[in-house]
Amino acid sequence: MNRSLRILGPSVLLAMALLAVFAGLAIGGGASAPAIGDPGTVVRFGLPITKLLVNLSVGVTLGTLVIALFALDSTRPAYTRALDIAAGAAGVYTVASAATAFYTFMSITGTQFSFGNDFGQKLAVFFTDVEVGQAWLITTLIAASVTVLCFAVRNQTGLFFVGVLALASLIPMAEQGHAAGAANHAQAVNGLGLHLVFAAVWVGGLLALILLKRELGAVELTQVLSRYSSVALICFIVVAVSGYVSAQLRIGAWSELLTPYGLLVLLKIAALVALGLFGAMYRRWVINRMPQPGAAAQGVVSKAARSRTRLFWILAATEIGFMGLASGFAAALARTATPVPQEAPQEGTPAILLTGDPLPPPVQPSSFVTGWDIDLIWLLVCGFGIFFYLAGVYRLHKRGDKWSVLRTISWVAGLLLLFYFTSGATNLYQRYMFSLHMLGHMGLTMAVPALLVPGAPFTLALRALHKRTDGSRGPREWVLTFVHAKISTFLSHGVIAAILFAGSLWVFYFSPLLRWAMEEHIGHEWMIAHFLITGYLFVNALIGVDPGPPRLGYPMRLLLLMATMAMHAFFGITIMMSTGLFAADWFGAMGRTWGPTPLEDQYIGGGIAWSVGEIPTIVLAIIVAVQWAKSDTREQNRNDRSEERTDDAKLRAYNEQLAKLAARDDADKDKV
């Protein structure tokens, strides 16, 4: 059974995926010969097949790494086997990416394969000068690096960064997919990127379980499956939401569902719904009836529990088939013409040429309520952040522990404010107006952290999350690893956090990073994350209560805050006094005819950095002063209680010491 299932699972996945690819190509015409520049039958069918292999292999790589990092004991054979599987899958990922890059070159250029110098020169130009060629070259190189590292790195902390590198390999794919160069570029890249990542973890995780079957005992399987099931539920939600966003951008109207592209989308949705039903079946019916740790320790694993385990494997093999269908239809969709044209704009207003989108309506006071540009990544971050925080509070409440309501309100308010700054009017206008960009920046780096830090998320996590006893690392263990890491200790030090907080302003705005964050979507997302993290580190060093390195004394905290406030004010004044535009070929070339001129708008942005940015700083100063006063009061109360318990032992000892000194002085006078 073990051997047959390990062979059957991947075979079913690949067979159903290939079946779906060929069916999808037939429905959507993705492999039809073009009228001009036909690269040949091998390329037309080989490209979607190699792309399918890319999706499946990166899925197994990521899924196995997630299982190893969050579900397996690093001292047991299953962990070593998982890393070997991840390395093998990464090797397939490397070869499949290289083949996809090669077929993509032949498909785009219509060039027939040859061993001549002309073919080699064109291929070299494709990989070095053409954006899509560069993207596939980067993906291939990262995949090769992951292959080597999966063999070389066995430490779980180091393996975490290998997983991050594997995730990074999907970024070029997300930026080159359907709609990536058209209007709504940011939404398209976010939707496709999230879809790729979470679908890969979902598919790869289940296939990893099947491949690890021999190394997992009945009880260990139950534990690992339960942990994977939680990850799979998150993946299902993200895949469903991101899939809807991606499909909406490509289909446009409901009537377009009857087009070949729309029919393939419906088939993929049907497969995903079936997968969701399988997940619900696991969580509600199968897992709780499989062999449990307590029963195994007592030697009472029932025949029904063993039967339920066999049922799981049957369901898993069936689910793998549906995953293959979904993966195959996805590969076919990538080769099918979309109802909404996905070409990048070649002409239009300056704003369209620069951003891919037309200018938004003129800014009005009502725009701060009605203006929205949803960033799917941060929508999901905020949504999951609120849900898991409230779930942790509920778990504490259920077992009789207390958690401050004010901390909960502060955390929820902080994430809602984060959602507004990343999806509201500031996000809608930040590419076109420096002042709105600066307002969003100040909110992300100062206002949001000032609300998030008092929520004490790490303290809540350490109290609410269950401690693992089987040698694996769960969320609680990873939180402790993160908190006690040397790099976290270094970055969390008050002086370092202040340098990062204040220095980032100058480096970002007085370097090409500003233009990069405006022009490239990945730069925009990096900007949000960077300023949010540096702001959080600084605020946490001042008023945080979460575990970490020893914080500076209150006088030093106030001094550091005042110095940072002065640097912040000087930064704002410098912008206001500037006579040249920041990113002049961006903000100055937008063609905006309403609102202040670019230079006037920049002056307003400097005023926002100086004035509005100081408001959270003043609030922080007040909080530090109040905490200082409370700290002194607590220390005094602690001393009073100690004196009461010891009958003023310290005071009497002090008086006795004074008496001895006085007696010694009298004796010295008598001698004189």
Image (tube, helix red, strand yellow):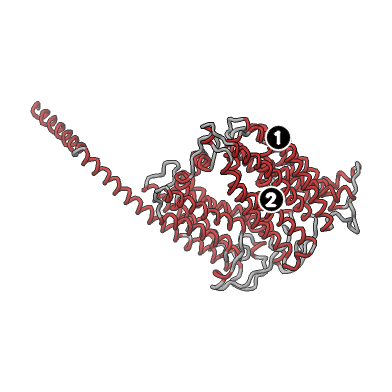
Q: Which of the pair 411/14 is nearer the observer? A: 14
Task: From this view, report whether residue 87 is shown above or below residue 561.
Answer: above
Question: Residue at horizontal 53%, vertical 58%?
Answer: 418
Circle count: 2
Tell me the quarter of the image containing the N terminus.
Answer: top right
Name the amino acid type tagged 1: Met
Q: Residue furthest top?
A: 671
Task: From this view, report whether residue 421 is shown above or below residue 105.
Answer: below
Q: Position of residue 35 (x, y in %)?
A: 91, 59
- Per the image, the residue denoted by label 2 is 196
Name the amino acid type tagged 2: Leu
Q: Position of residue 347 (x, y in %)?
A: 76, 67
- Per the image, the residue denoted by label 1 is 1
Residue 652 picture quarter = top left
Q: Which of the pair 444/9 is nearer the observer? A: 9
Q: Which of the pair 637/510 is nearer the observer? A: 637
Q: CA distance from mark 1 to mark 2?
A: 32 Å
Q: Which mark's residue is nearer the viewer, 1 or 2? A: 1
Q: Which of the pair 2/142 is nearer the observer? A: 2
Q: Position of residue 366 (x, y in %)?
A: 55, 73
Task: Answer left or right for 638 relative to 557.
Answer: left
The crowd level at tag 1 (other Cα within 10 Å; few <14, some 14-19, many 20+) is few
| Residue 390 visible to an observer of this rendering | yes
- Quick one: SS at disc 1? loop
